[in-house]
Structure formats: structure tokens, C-alpha cells
Amino acid sequence: MAFTWEFSALFAKEFANFPTDQQDAVLDFTATFAAHGLADFTKYTGKITPTWNGATVGSAQHAYAKANDLWHYHLGLPHYNYVHGKYATSDWVLHFQWPSKGSHIRLVDVCYHKMATGAFYVPGRKYLAAAPDPGEPEEAATK
């Protein structure tokens, strides 16, 4: 089975300006995903979990994350923390959409796991839009 991934439109623009260590961490994740998919989380150094697990059950944030199939991966930035026996965590996470736990994901954002206020970060709707098809005229892609 082929495992494929894509950037959301906004994330693709932002990724181009990321420092090299952040780009490398994201691309390490995509390389592992392309080789193994997400059936076996032990193939990854960082923790992978549904984003809605970080939100209060019954909250709008929880419903939004679940409805949009949002997951996140601990990238190891600025470094990995090994405080759990099964997985490593980090301050920065990569958010991605994993519809129906299928073979395709969309990378949508990199940000702090928790904001300075202590609130769990969930990417906004503007991060979820797919990049237009390269063969499609830009005018048609925005309709």
C-alpha cells in the first residue's frame, strides 16, 4: 500500500520559511509515514495522538478537532522529553489530518503543544484548506 501526504495551502507557504531544523523534523516524519503509514506508532520517535484528546470533552475545540480528523505528532523540537516509557514528547507538535485513518494525510501546522496560557493549541480553519491542484487554474481553485 502506498502512503501519501500533502501540505495544506497555508502550511506549504509557511513551511518554506521554517528554520532548517523544523523542516528536517517535518520531513523526517513524512519519510517515516511514506515508508510505514500510521498503523504502527512504534516506527516514530515522537508520540502520535488525536488532537481532540488534548481538548475538553464536549467543548467546541474537541468537536472541531474530531470533525476535522486532526491528529498531532511530537516533533522533538526543541528536543524530545523521555518521561513516558512508551513514547517521547516535545514542546512543538505537527498537526495533520488523517481522514478515516486511511493511507493519506494532510499536514496543516506546526506549533507549541500548549500555548503560554496553558491552553491546548488546535489549528484554525484557515490551516485546513487543501492546496489547489497544480493543474487547476488558481481562479477555479478558489470557487
Image (cartoon, grey):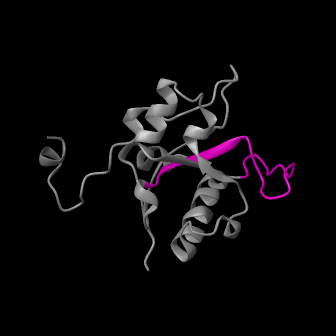
Image quadrant in which you'd find residue 115: top right
- Give the vertical position of 113 relative to 138 (above or below): above
Left or right position of 23 against 84:
left
Specify start and end residues of the magenta stretch as a single range: 76-98
- Give the vertical position of 29 relative to 76 (above or below): below
Residue located 49% across and 35% down the image: 123
Left or right position of 53 against 7:
right
List the single residue furthest toward the front.
58
The residue lying toward the viewer, choosing from 107 and 63, is: 63
Residue located 57% across and 74% down the image: 36
Q: Give coordinates of residue 82: x percent, y percent.
A: 86, 52
Q: Give coordinates of residue 114: x percent, y percent.
A: 67, 31
Left or right position of 92 against 130:
right
Quadrant for the C terminus, please: top left
Quadrant for the N terminus, please: bottom left
- Give the vertical position of 40 relative to 109 (above or below): below
Q: Give coordinates of residue 31: x percent, y percent.
A: 56, 70
Residue located 24% across and 60% down the image: 134
Q: Main secondary structure of the magenta part?
A: loop
The residue lying toward the viewer, choosing from 137 and 71, is: 71
List the single residue furthest toward the bottom.
1
Q: Is residue 107 magenta?
A: no
Note whether residue 16 is visible. no
Q: Give coordinates of residue 13: x percent, y percent.
A: 42, 46
